[in-house]
Amino acid sequence: MAQLIDKALETENRYFQLASKDMVYLKFVLEAYEGLCTMSTVDGKRGIVKVNYPLPFAEDVHDLLEALCGEIALTEVCAGGEPCCTS
């Protein structure tokens, strides 16, 4: 039981770059799903944000961010803002 609770409390971060004008919209949408995830600004000038979520919600967050890509340009980046390398 304790292991299940520990897993539920673990979180993950994903970083995205987007136009500064879309940052407020993204935060508004993410906050509408209360408790799903949080968004914080890492670098406002470069449009880098961090999305933090509990691991059990990873699939839901992924699906939501994929859907948002149809509305705003979201590019996943590494923590420092550099493009992510996918091999």
Image (spheres, rainbow, N blue to C red):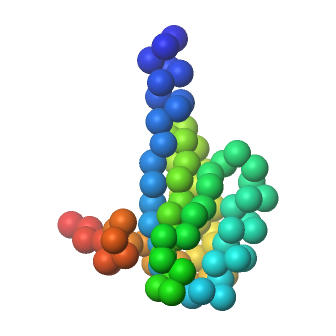
Point 51% across, 11% down: residue: 1
Can see residue 63? no
Marker count (numbered)? 0
- Quadrant for residue 73, please give it: bottom right
Assign the C terminus to one quadrant of the image: bottom left
Q: Is residue 61 above or below residue 48?
A: above
Comparing 66 with 77, the one in front is: 77
Q: x%, y% of residue 18? A: 53, 82
Q: x%, y% of residue 10? A: 47, 36
Q: x%, y% of residue 37? A: 62, 52
Residue located farthest toward the left when viewing the structure as drawn = 87
Can see residue 16? yes
Report whether 75 appears left or right of 39: left
Q: x%, y% of residue 40? A: 57, 64
Point 51% across, 87% down: residue: 45
Q: Is residue 70 above or below residue 13?
A: below
Residue located farthest toward the top when viewing the structure as drawn = 1
Report whether 22 appears left or right of 49: right
Comparing 30 with 50, the one in front is: 50
Point 66% across, 48% down: residue: 36
Residue located farthest toward the right when viewing the structure as drawn = 32
Point 72% across, 76% down: residue: 25
Comparing 66 with 23, the one in front is: 23
Q: Is residue 24 above or below residue 33?
A: below
